[in-house]
Amino acid sequence: MTDVFISYSRDDRNRVRLIAHGLAAEGYAVWWDPEIRPGKKWNAAIRRALDNAAAVVTVWSPKSAKSEWVAAETQHGHARKALAPVTIKHCMPPIPYNMIQTADLTRWRGDPDDPEWIAVLQQVRALVEAKRRLLAGAPPPGEAHGAEGRGYSSAAGQAESAGHYSASATRGKMAPRASRLAIGAVVATVVVTGGLWLGQGLLTETGVLAPTSRGLPPSVTVAPAPAIAPDVPTVAPTPEPAAPAGSAPPPIPAEDKPSTPAAPVAPTRADDR
């Protein structure tokens, strides 16, 4: 695997060689164009090295700032968040790379204790270690117990874990009570809603709440009110006195007797006169 890819202008080859040798002395696998073997396609070799490199070190100079190849390689490294730029000659890098922190190696001549060179090594080391952890499937710094020099405290981690466990246990104990409170709230809501709905009804003459124009809930049915008969006193009929035994029925008045129809009179013929 390529650890460091160096992007530079050929006019700066001698200065770049110091950088490549300094990185190799730290144990990193460094790629720069003198390593391209004859017969290999230039574009394919560059792209493969760029894709595999953990850090892309762009060497800015007046010449490289105008190079389209350097700009393309720098863009690739910046998109992968693997860029570690340095400056060997004073110049203005192209936009937007002029706004990125750049190590100043304009006076560096290979001194391993130079502060600017140490800053370059620290940035490259962080990128390479991150790539190696990613390939190994290890957690990022600060998540593994026992990490040193990265602001991680095992005691703080244990305290955080204990607090998380305590909070989880407390939530578990309070769950039944929370459920009961939730059920009570639902019941109260239903009762209040039903009372408000009933209060919006209209009273009929029989005292039964009639549904309003807003309609009824689907689960409620109002039966029709039964008809109420008026309160009219009922008088029982008075029985007639019974007739004494052995007495004849009273005579029927003449006007009440049925009349017997008279017999028809036959017509008289002329010869009977």
Image (tube, rainbow, N blue to C red):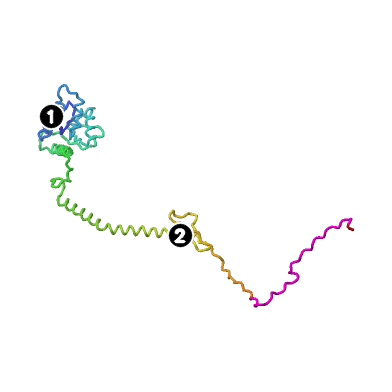
**Does the magenta segment cover residue 263?**
yes
Q: Nearer the viewer, residue 8 or 266?
A: 266
Q: Is residue 189 left or right of residue 148?
A: right
Which element is circle 1 on?
Answer: helix
Residue nearest the observer in this picture, 70 or 237: 237
Q: Which residues are magenta?
A: 242-271
Q: Residue 154 placed where, x, y %?
A: 14, 50
Q: Is residue 25 above or below residue 232?
A: above
259 w.r.t. 52: above or below: below
- Can residue 119 be seen? no
- Which callout, 1 or 2, points to the residue nearer the camera? 2
In which quadrant is the N terminus drawn? top left
Residue visible at 21% across and 33% down in the picture: 77
Residue 173 position in % (x across, y down): 24, 58
Q: Quadrant of residue 239?
A: bottom right
Label 1 belongs to which residue? 17
Q: Residue at x 18, y 39 (%)?
A: 134
Q: Kindly state the secondary structure of the residue where label 2 is placed.
A: helix
Quarter placement of the C terminus: bottom right
Identity of the residue drawn at 15% across and 25% down? 36
Q: Pointer 2: residues within 10 angstroms few (<14), some, or many (20+)? A: some
In the image, 249 versus 72, the foreground residue is: 249
In the image, which disc is placed on residue 198?
Answer: 2
Q: Amino acid at mark 1?
A: Arg
Dominant secondary-structure state across the stretch colored magenta: loop
Residue 262: quarter of image:
bottom right
Q: CA distance from mark 1 to mark 2?
A: 91 Å
* Residue type of the residue flagged with mark 2: Leu
Image coordinates for residue 187, horizontal then vertical, percent: 37, 59
Give the mark nearer the N terminus: 1 vs 2. 1
Q: Is residue 118 visible?
A: yes
